Image (spheres, grey):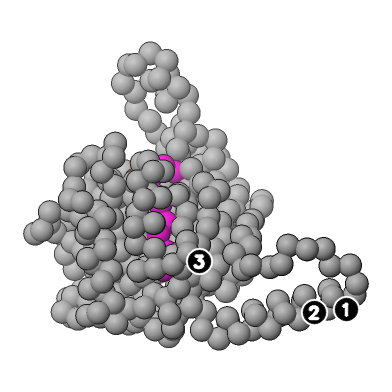
Amino acid sequence: MQDAQQHLKTGVVFLNFSAAVAPANLKVKVIETKAIESLVANFPAQNFTGSFQVFLFFGFFWAKTRRSNKSMLRILFLGDIVGEPGRKAVISRLKAIKEEQSVDFIIVNGENAAAGRGITPKIAIDLMRAGAAVITSGDHIWDQQEIVEFMEMEPRMLRPLNYPEGTVGFGSIVLKTGKGKVGVINAQGRTFMQPPLENPFLAVEAEALRMREEEGAEVIFVDFHAETTSEKIAMGRSIDGLVSAVIGTHTHVQTADEQIFPGGTAFLCDAGMCGPLESVLGREFKPVVERFRTAIPRRFPVAKGRVGIRGVLVDVDEKTGKATGIRRFSEDLELREP
Ligand SMILES: [Fe+2]
Ligand SMILES: [Fe+2]
């Protein structure tokens, strides 16, 4: 805690990525992993027939990859972690995913990690020990009371930036890594979202400019926690070129619109959730269906069974802060208690 208070003065935290811990008493079977490649480079759209042409093509690709790797920082971002199944899946797999996907920096959204509602200090610490550099959140951030005091001291646990001035906690952070400074901003949309917050478009733009000018952050990642695709796309377009990535959360369903805007900002409407697949957004589907059919309020327990880990991998040129690649990440797991 003393360290965290010291960090608050500078806004910069030095990271130790070697602090990953193995989960206890949990067996995991990975069913399927997908990193869906997006061809963001402008490869010529023609058929290569001769072997010489194929050789040239792969030679070009190899040279391009080698060049870009020299100053490339790869961010793994995982969408809303839901309940015990979601956090167990993430904690058990994060270290391996980091190695398998050559990840430099991990951000996770933990707003539903505590039984589907909010996050506790213990869960936040477990996620950080597993490898998460920053935890973002959203409209469920206040559901567990004890997180309030924790947020006062832990600047890597973010709440949306656009809460009124004076609200406890932090909406952004700049961390110093081996590949330069990385900024993370968490903001919340206003369309069909509660509570009504300050204008996220103006707040994020001002904060990104401040992080660049005052803290020297070239790489800036934005988790925009919002309901509508229109508000999320508008956010991406609004700050295209100012930040490295705008990735949406909150809907718990991964979208397939990953792209890099002309200014160099990677974008995806929603990263999806880390949680039970046989569910409605991570909750048992039967009571949710009943609620829709009858309009009678019901309890919605977190579902069980197969778990999906959903997120996105973003490659950023650490010198310019421009995104060079974006891939959706998707892995299905069978969690078995011993
Ligand atoms: Fe949410
Ligand atoms: Fe959520």
Which amino acid lies under the numbered mark 3 shown in the image of this protein?
Answer: Val
Q: Report crowding for label 3: few under 14, some 14 to 19, many 20 or more residues within 10 A (C-alpha).
A: many
Which residue position holds label 1? 52
Q: Report crowding for label 1: few under 14, some 14 to 19, many 20 or more residues within 10 A (C-alpha).
A: few
Q: Is label 3 in a helix, a strand or a loop?
A: strand
Q: Is label 1 in a helix, a strand or a loop?
A: helix
Callout 2–callout 1 Cβ contact below 8 Å: yes
Tag 3 or tag 1, which sits nearer the N-term?
Answer: 1
Which amino acid lies under the numbered mark 2 shown in the image of this protein?
Answer: Leu
Q: Position of residue 62 (x, y in %)?
A: 71, 80
**Distance between the alpha carbons at the discs numbered 1 and 3:** 32 Å
Which numbered disc, 1 or 3, marks the residue closer to the eye?
1
Q: Nearer the viewer, residue 261 or 142?
A: 261
Which numbered disc, 3 or 2, marks the residue closer to the eye?
2
| Horizontal side, residue 45 vs residue 329: left or right | right
Circle on res. 56: 2
Q: Report crowding for label 2: few under 14, some 14 to 19, many 20 or more residues within 10 A (C-alpha).
A: few
Circle on res. 314: 3
Q: Quadrant of the N terminus?
A: bottom left
Q: Is label 2 in a helix, a strand or a loop?
A: helix
**Distance between the alpha carbons at the discs numbered 3 and 2:** 27 Å
| Horizontal side, residue 312 vs residue 200: left or right | right
Residue range in magenta is 244-252
Residue at 32% x, 78% y is 217
Residue 245 vertical position relative to residue 111 in the rendered view, above or below: below
Q: Position of residue 69 (x, y in %)?
A: 58, 81
**Distance between the alpha carbons at the discs numbered 2 and 1:** 6 Å
Q: Quadrant of residue 194?
A: top left
Residue 323 vertical position relative to residue 291 in the rendered view, above or below: below
